[in-house]
Image (cartoon, helix red, strand yellow):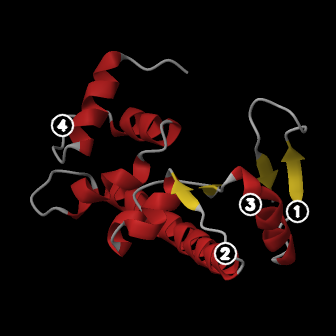
């Protein structure tokens, strides 16, 4: 669905912590949901003195709460995987959301919606890393064919 630029501007103002006047909150929330930025609105709804409707506050708080639970589970998975890799002398590089999970303050981890853990290992350690993760019950969903320009594996 296409959104008018005014809705994007309103969402940007919300992300800056400024509640827009007379906003079409349903359109703003729909755009926030489509852009996976809804949990970031927690800063706006938790600041006193902002004119945000109570139902909007309740919705954002619930999305933030659920995202915090998911991200806590992802962080536990990440810690388990990194510890197992390190035990086999594999040092992964944490990419994208994985780096955020590992370094962000607990209250900030929930502002980013994520569904996977991206890690990078030395190509010479790839087979060891895959075996370590298989030992943790990860299963290969896809692996690039040998000799491909890009080598990667998707695990589940």
Disc 2 to disc 3, how far (Cα)? 9 Å
Residue 106 visible in the shown view: yes
Quick check: 146 left or right of 48? right
| Mark 2 vs 1, N-terminal side | 2
| Residue with the mark numbered 3 | 125
Residue position marked by numbered label 2 in the rendering: 89
- At x 66%, y 69%, the residue is 90
- Work out which quarter of the rendered image holds the C terminus and state it: bottom right
Q: How far apart are marks 2 and 1 (CA)?
A: 21 Å
Q: In which quadrant will I find the N terminus?
A: top right
- Can you tell which of label 2 and label 1 is closer to the viewer? 2
**Could you give the CA–CA distance between mark 2 and mark 4, rounded to whole angstroms?**
52 Å
Name the residue carrying label 4: 20
Instruction: Judge by depth and name the residue closer to the eye, 138 or 92.
Output: 92
First along the sequence among labels 2 and 4 = 4
Question: Which residue shows up at 72% across the image and 51% down it?
Answer: 123
Q: Say if mark 1 contacts mark 3, CB within 8 Å.
A: no
Instruction: Give the x, y percent position of residue 129.
Output: 76, 65
What kind of element bears circle 1? loop
Closer to the camera: disc 2 or disc 4?
Answer: 2
Mark positioned earlier in the residue sequence (1 or 3):
3
Q: Is mark 2 on a helix, strand or loop?
A: loop
Question: In the image, which disc is placed on residue 139?
Answer: 1
Q: Quadrant of residue 107?
A: bottom left
Horizontally, residue 99 falls left or right of residue 154, namely: left
Q: Position of residue 141 (x, y in %)?
A: 87, 51
């Amino acid at each position: 669905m296409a959104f008018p630029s005014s809705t994007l501007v309103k969402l940007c103002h919300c992300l800056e912590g400024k509640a827009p006047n007379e906003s079409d909150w349903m359109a703003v929330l729909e755009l926030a949901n489509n852009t996976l930025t809804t949990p970031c609105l927690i800063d706006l709804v938790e600041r006193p003195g902002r004119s945000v409707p109570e139902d909007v506050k309740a919705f954002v708080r619930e999305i933030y709460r659920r995202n915090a639970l998911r991200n806590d589970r992802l962080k536990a998975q990440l810690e388990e995987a990194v510890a197992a890799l390190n035990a086999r002398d594999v040092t992964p590089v944490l990419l994208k959301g994985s780096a955020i999970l590992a370094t962000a303050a607990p209250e900030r981890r929930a502002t980013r919606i994520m569904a996977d853990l991206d890690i990078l290992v030395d190509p010479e350690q790839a087979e060891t890393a895959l075996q370590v993760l298989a030992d943790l019950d990860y299963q290969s969903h896809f692996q690039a064919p040998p000799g491909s320009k890009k080598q990667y594996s998707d695990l589940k």
